Amino acid sequence: MITARGLVHAYGERRAVDGTDFHLLPGERVALAGPNGAGKSTLLRMLATLLRPRSGDLEVLGHPQPDQARAARAGIGYLAHDPLVYLDLTARQNLELYGDLYGVPDRDARIDSLLDDVGLLARAEDTVRTFSRGMAQRLALARMLLHRPRLLLLDEPHASLDARGGDLLDRQLVAAQGDGRAAVIVTHEVERVARVADRLVVLRAGRVVLDEPITGMDPPEVRRRYEDVIA
Amino acid sequence: MRRRQLMALVRKDLRLELRTRETIVAMALFAIVVLAILQFGFGTRDDDLTRFVGGLMWVTLAFTAVLGVGRSYVAEREQRVLDGLLVSPVPRTVMMSAKAIAIFLYMTLVEVLVIPLVGIFFVKGPYWESIGWIAIAALLANLCIALSGTLFSGLALFTRARDLILPVLFLPALVPVVIAAAGATHAVAGGPHDMSEWRGYCLFLLAYAILFALVSVATYDAVFDD
């Protein structure tokens, strides 16, 4: 799904990602953790093809980057801090827009089904400006899943999702393993994400300082492991 | 697929504009105010300013275009949606084309107001029979404005001083468009038509639009992906 070798990205002179290696297999769900400024979001944006690596090799869904970015994008679902939806369009209009951008074949039926899943079917014709933060983020979840992506890239998803959205996301992540979809979940909530992740990768100062399986480990144990590494 | 993406992006821009009416209304009000100031500046209604009508019209429309183009990515920027578009598999040229179509439509709507007003404010002689020729030149000029404006607004989008950068980049690029569109307007407004002069200016506008279309296609990926 993802193969990255020696990735570097810098903001001015400061290297946010500094020679990072990373890989992701089909069905795998990786929790990407680290202290503030460790380079987690920068790495995720590179994996999402939103940032070009300054150096290093990156392949996403079998497509070398940045040369075949568009081919990779068709299979990526990206959930950011912001919902990435227009506040002055309705929930349905936003999903129609993204459905057309991704060429979703059964657009209208898929939109109805997802709006129902995220509990927004009754508010489908309301503009997003009238939504609470949690509702907007649930709409973002529907936007991310609309085109049935094979690779989910999530930037601190539980931080802004309400309980219903968080549970739905967790169910999606559990189901992902069965159907071969993979996920990278940037998080500060290691203990929560440990329940649905197979592997923990910890970044510090732009470098990977821990990369180990956590399947079967108790979430508090995963948290202790993480805290030991960043201490 | 590209057609579906293009139509979706254009429909989105028009829906946003219909709901907020922020760009069109601002452009129209701005153009009317500039025309009124120019009329007061040039004297009374008794003076026939047919000789200057091309310049008066196109200086007004050039500044109006800067205002409209400057607002072309406001929704994406202020509502932080740009990453959603950039992470989707939409070719950057399709994104550019959608914005260019929206700017083209906004300029055309403003001109529906401005071209008759220019006749009322500044022309004493025959003008209304020339409206069709002026409109053709205006559509070609709009094409130039839309294509160059989209490119420069894309470039300015990722700069900190974008409100300053855009006019600094865009206005010089508009100078040839203003010269040609004003020349084409002057050639047919207010007297015997000089169709060969009008045709020459229109061909120049068409060539300029083609040039910017080629430059945009060649550079737009780099604008958004680098």
Image: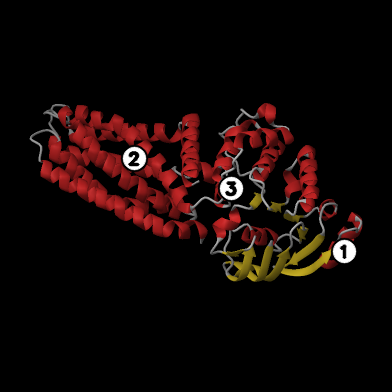
Categorize mark 3 by other alpha carbons within 10 Å: few (<14), some (14-19), many (20+): many
Q: Dot 1 corresponds to which residue?
A: A225
**Residue A158: percent from left, percent from top:** 76, 47
- Report the coloring of the rendering: secondary structure
Label 1 lies in what chain?
Answer: A
Categorize mark 2 by other alpha carbons within 10 Å: few (<14), some (14-19), many (20+): many
Q: Dot 2 corresponds to which residue?
A: B64
**Residue B106: percent from left, percent from top:** 38, 36
Looking at the image, residue B70 sits to the left or right of residue A63; the answer is left
Earlier sequence position, callout 3 versus callout 2: 2
Residue at figure coordinates x 85%, y 52% from the top left: A195
Callout 3 touching callout 1 (CB < 8 Å): no
Give the number of the disc on residue B84.
Answer: 3
Asked if both marks, 3 and 1, belong to the same chain, the answer given is no
Disc 2 element: helix
Check disc 1 and give the amino acid type.
Arg
